């Protein structure tokens, strides 16, 4: 049997990338910004609801950083962040010298828990500082509880930054993830549902904010004939070459979503039969997931657990990985406040991400299925 490595999430080309990249090279538009960047932004704006303004940047991380800057987050300010996430959601808080305050997940969507969010806000206010922003994440493509989370945020008048890096194409009540918060962010890193090799985007709801984002991302150049700067600048703009890749990639976004959702139903069939495993699903019919990654919780038995399954898959040259280790357990973030119980910790102990590339073949699926069903037999 073919033993080629099966990866968690691989990029795939549509075949149209070359044409846009070639055009950039032919016209010598090989710097940051340019016609491909403008076109890529328009394509994304059209993809989102009317009124979405998109700024293409060089990463999702820089998009989160700019969102914090545009919200005026300064040293010593407190920013609430979902603990169960990739570190890139939280690092920009430290770039600003601000203080991250971590909040546990709830067990339906594995995303930020609205009750603990409110407990955290109340307690921070009692301690003398109202949090200045909330970073909520649609982890693995599954929308967080948008209504509940935003109701809490609105009650205390705190802006939400919606980390939609993993959720391009996911929706909540028919509206696209990334368009609910004061800011939404996307990532086009190589492992995401579409890629620009490296890239990201900031979604805002005004033209003026978009202009400010472009200003900061392009070294904060004041209007002058010489280089003049009144504010700290950043080199965060997307390059015209990367945007060319993005223009090719966005053509197959819908196809990729369909393929990832098919992967989900493939896994659902397997795990329906296996009692000791719980596949993460949408429990609420108002949500639609792109199922960027399929993730499972493995019940710990005497001789069967998450780590043993991971090693068994590895032996068959199939990549899998524990879920994100919660931020409040990370050495760099441990000293910051945390509100919650042990939901995220338990998810981390039992959770495993399974291969979910858009181009997973039938042969790949057969290999995965065989290893998993043998393991639980
Ligand atoms: C990938 C990712 C990011 C960061 O995006 P980059 O483009 O890699 O900087 C942020 N948050 C989450 C949840 C991610 O998965």
Image (cartoon, rainbow, N blue to C red):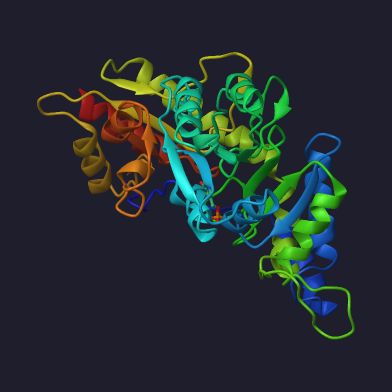
Instruction: Say which quarter of the image contains residue 276.
Output: top left
Judging depth in this view, the residue of 248 and 44 nearest the camera is 44
- Camera sees residue 107: yes
> Is residue 248 toward the left or the right of residue 146 in the image?
right
Direction left: furthest residue: 302
Which residue: 84% across, 86% down?
Answer: 226
Relative image position of residue 284 (x, y in whole percent): 56, 14
The quarter holding residue 254 reads top right
| Residue at left offset 64%, top offset 40% | 168
Check the image and report above or below for 177 versus 108: below
Instruction: Give the x, y percent position of residue 167.
Output: 60, 37
Left of 15 or right of it: where is 93?
left
In the drawing, does residue 197 fall left or right of residue 237?
left
Question: Where residue 235 sits in the image (x, y, percent)?
Answer: 66, 70
Residue at 76%, 54% in the rendered image: 55
**Residue 266: percent from the left, percent from the top?**
46, 26
Looking at the picture, does residue 156 appear above or below residue 45? above
Q: Nearer the viewer, residue 369 or 246?
A: 246
The residue at the far bottom in this view is 226
Quadrant of the drawing holding the C terminus: top left
Foreground pick, 191 / 208:
208
Q: Count up the numbered dots.
A: 0
Q: Is residue 85 visible?
A: no
Quarter of image, res 307: top left
Vertical side of 324 occupied by 222: above or below: below
């Amino acid at each position: 049997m073919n033993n080629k490595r099966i990866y968690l999430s691989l990029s795939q080309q549509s075949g149209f990338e070359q044409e846009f990249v070639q055009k950039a090279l032919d016209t010598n538009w090989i710097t940051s910004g340019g016609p491909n960047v403008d076109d890529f932004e328009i394509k994304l704006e059209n993809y989102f609801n009317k009124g979405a303004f998109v700024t293409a940047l060089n990463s999702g991380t820089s998009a989160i950083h700019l969102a914090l800057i545009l919200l005026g987050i300064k040293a010593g300010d407190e920013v609430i962040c979902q603990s169960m996430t990739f570190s890139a959601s939280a690092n920009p808080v430290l770039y600003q010298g601000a203080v991250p305050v971590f909040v546990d997940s709830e067990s339906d969507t594995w995303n930020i828990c609205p009750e603990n969010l409110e407990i955290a806000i109340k307690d921070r206010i009692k301690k003398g500082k109202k949090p200045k922003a909330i970073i909520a994440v649609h982890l693995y493509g599954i929308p967080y509880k948008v209504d509940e989370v935003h109701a809490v945020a609105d009650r205390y008048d705190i802006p939400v930054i919606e980390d939609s890096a993993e959720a391009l194409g996911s929706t909540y009540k028919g509206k696209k993830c990334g368009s609910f918060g004061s800011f939404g962010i996307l990532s086009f890193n190589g492992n995401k549902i579409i890629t620009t090799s490296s890239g990201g985007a900031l979604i805002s709801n005004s033209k003026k904010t978009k202009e400010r984002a472009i200003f900061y991302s392009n070294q904060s150049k004041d209007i002058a004939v010489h280089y003049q700067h009144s504010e700290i600048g950043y080199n965060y703009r997307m390059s015209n070459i990367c945007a060319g890749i993005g223009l090719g990639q966005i053509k197959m976004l819908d196809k990729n979503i369909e393929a990832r959702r098919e992967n989900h139903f493939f896994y659902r069939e397997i795990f329906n039969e296996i009692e000791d495993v719980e596949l993460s699903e949408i429990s609420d019919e108002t949500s639609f997931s792109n199922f960027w990654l399929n993730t499972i919780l493995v019940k710990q038995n005497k001789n069967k657990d998450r780590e043993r399954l991971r090693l068994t898959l590895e032996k068959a040259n199939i990549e899998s990985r524990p879920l994100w280790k919660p931020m409040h357990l990370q050495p760099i973030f441990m000293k910051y406040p945390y509100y919650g119980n042990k939901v995220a910790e338990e998810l981390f102990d039992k959770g495993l991400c399974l291969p979910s590339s858009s181009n997973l073949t039938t042969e790949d699926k057969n290999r995965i299925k065989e290893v998993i069903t043998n393991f639980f037999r």
